Image (cartoon, grey):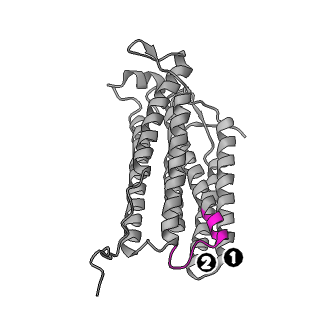
Amino acid sequence: MADAHAKPQHDYHLVDPSPWPFLGSVGALVTAIGGVCLMQYLKAGSFPIFGHNIANPWLFFIGLLIVIYTMFAWWSDTIKEAHEGHHTRVVSLHLRYGMIMFIASEVMFFVAWFWAFFDASLFPGETQQYARTAFTGGVWPPKGMEVLDPFHLPLYNTIILLLSGTTVTWAHHSLIHGDRKGLINGLVLTVGLGMLFTMVQAYEYMHAPFGFKDSIYGATFFMATGFHGFHVIIGTIFLLVCLVRAMKGDFTPKQHFGFEAAAWYWHFVDVVWLFLFSAIYVWASNGAMIEAH
């Protein structure tokens, strides 16, 4: 006879209330407020609210530590649940939906920077934007602006990211076919290529013939490419964690969503770069002075 007090069995996992959503929200709020305080502190050394100076630069870093701890603990719990067999088909499907929605939000994030870039570049002499016309001279790139050669370091980075897309795909196919050595080798190459991309971009930034504050060209350039570079760093860390887990034997051909999510994210980063390279580096440099090597 069945136990009347037994819990019903479902194809999804019911967990005890998790503290991480609330703690993560607190960390995000503290980080946001701390970010404003930090910028005001760096600018003027004070940020008075209701007569009190709250411009403490440490508030931002406290919030950031809360967010990082929440990420580590929450994902650790997710991995633990996977090992315990709680990632049923329904749970796995919802994890995939979550990653898809996250990438969709990232797409809209970059749409904002592309919008700013194309609004400035397609309408450099807009009559209603008097300040813009004064800075650009009514042309794009702005008059006298020396730009980067798109077929030098940017082209190298394009090749690097395209190669990294093939190596992460190789790692994925190796995992599906039970080839753990191919999985590890593919991830090692992908992480290495991601680091190489970051180093090349850092070198490019240090030798760029224009700055962030120089003009609207510099502002839109560094915001779009800089945030992409930040996403490359995040993706590299994501894949590095997958590499460590692969070495520990965490992934199996049937259960490897952690790696699959990292691969999706990396391909998204690749696609965004292709748009950046085509629009901001190649198209936007047409007719401009190219930096001499």
Q: Quadrant of the C terminus?
A: top right
Residue extending farthest bottom: 1
**Which region is colored magenta?**
242-257
Does residue 268 show up magenta in the picture?
Answer: no
N-terminal of the pair, mark 1 or mark 2, is 2
Across and down, in percent, residue 98 comes to 39, 60
- Give the class, few, some or many, for how many residues have Cα within 10 Å of label 1's Cα (few <14, many ≥20): some
Does residue 253 show up magenta in the picture?
Answer: yes
Q: Is residue 2 left or right of residue 135?
A: left
Residue extending farthest right: 293
Across and down, in percent, residue 169 comes to 57, 70
Q: Which residue is mark 1?
A: 181
Q: Is residue 54 left or right of residue 239?
A: left
Q: Is residue 170 visible?
A: yes
Across and down, in percent, residue 280 comes to 51, 44
**Residue drawn at the location 65% of the way across and 59% of the way down:** 191
Q: Which residue is mark 2?
A: 174
Instruction: Say above or below: 254 vs 133.
Output: below
Say which element carries label 1: helix
Please tell me which residue lies in front, 140 or 3.
3
Circle on res. 106: none
Say which element carries label 2: helix
**Residue drawn at the location 59% of the way across and 30% of the way down:** 211
Q: Name the amino acid type tagged 1.
A: Lys
Q: Are marks 1 and 2 in contact (CB under 8 Å)?
A: yes
